[in-house]
Amino acid sequence: MPPATQSTAATVARWRAAAEGADAQAAVACLSPDIVLSSPLTEQFRLEGPEEVGDFLASAFTAIEDIRFHTEIGQVDAYALAYRARIGTQPFEEVQMLRFDDDAQISEISLYGRPMPALTALMITLGPKLARQQGRRGLAALLRATSTPVHSMVTFGDRRVVPLTRPRSPELHRGR
C-alpha cells in the first residue's frame, strides 16, 4: 500500500525545511530506518541507515551553503526536488529523487548535481571530511590530494575552454 499523499507531502515539507536550515537532525527525522542514499559522486559506495546518512548530511550541510529549493514534482511515493546553492564560491544546483516507504518516510535518495566545477569542489570538501569522521586522516589527505588536480582541470576547462565551443552567431559565419 503506498503512503498517504498528505503524509508524504508533510515529510517533503519537513525535509525541505531541514535542508534549507542545514539541520541534519531534522532531516534524519524524515528518514526510514531502511534509508539508502546513492552517492552523488561515485557508484563505488552507498550510504545505508539513518546514522550513515545523517553523518553524510551533517558534512554536506557544512559544504553546501544557502540551499534554496525552487522546484518540487511529486506523486504519492516519489518526489523530485531541485535547489540552488553554492559550494564555496561555486554556484551549485542539485536534484534529489526521493522515494517513500509505507509510513511516508524517505526510504531512498538519489542525488544529481551540476555544474562539474561545483561537483569537484564538493569532492575536495566532502570526501576528506567524511574520511576524517571515520578516523581515517591518511585517506582524507589522499582524497584531497587526488581531487584537487581534477578540480583545477575542470574549473579551468569550464572557465576558459568550454566558452570557446559556444555556437557563433549566423552573422559571424557569413564572412567566412
Image (spheres, rainbow, N blue to C red):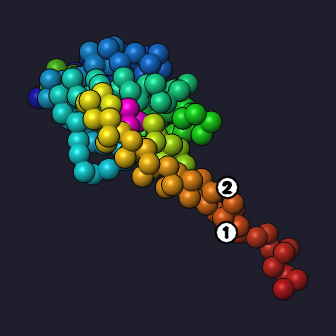
Residue 98 picture location, percent across and down:
30, 34
Residue under circle 1?
165
Magenta stretch secondary structure, dominant: helix
Is residue 127 one of those drawn in magenta? yes
Circles 2, 1 touching at the beta carbon (< 8 Å): no
At label 1, the amino acid type is Thr
**Total residue callouts:** 2
User: How many angstroms separate mark 2 from mark 1 (CA)?
Assistant: 11 Å
Is residue 42 one of those drawn in magenta? no
At label 2, the amino acid type is Arg
From where the camera sits, is residue 25 visible?
Answer: yes
Tell me: 38 left or right of 166. Answer: left
Residue 105 picture location, percent across and down:
22, 22
Residue under circle 2?
159
Q: At numbered mark 2, what does the secondary structure look like: helix, strand or loop?
A: helix
Q: At numbered mark 1, what does the secondary structure look like: helix, strand or loop?
A: helix
Residue 7 - label: none
Residue displayed at 28% across by 23% down: 54
- 121 up-or-down from 65: above or below: below
Tell me: 66 left or right of 35. Answer: right
Q: Nearer the viewer, residue 122 or 172?
A: 122
Tell me: 24 left or right of 37. Answer: right
Residue 93 picture location, percent across and down:
52, 39
Q: Which stretch is magenta?
A: 126-130
Mark closest to the chain's N terminus, 2 or 1: 2
Callout in the foreground (2, 1):
2
Residue displayed at 55% across by 25% down: 66
Tell me: 86 left or right of 111. Answer: right
Farthest residue, direction right: 175
Residue 37 picture location, percent across and down:
26, 37
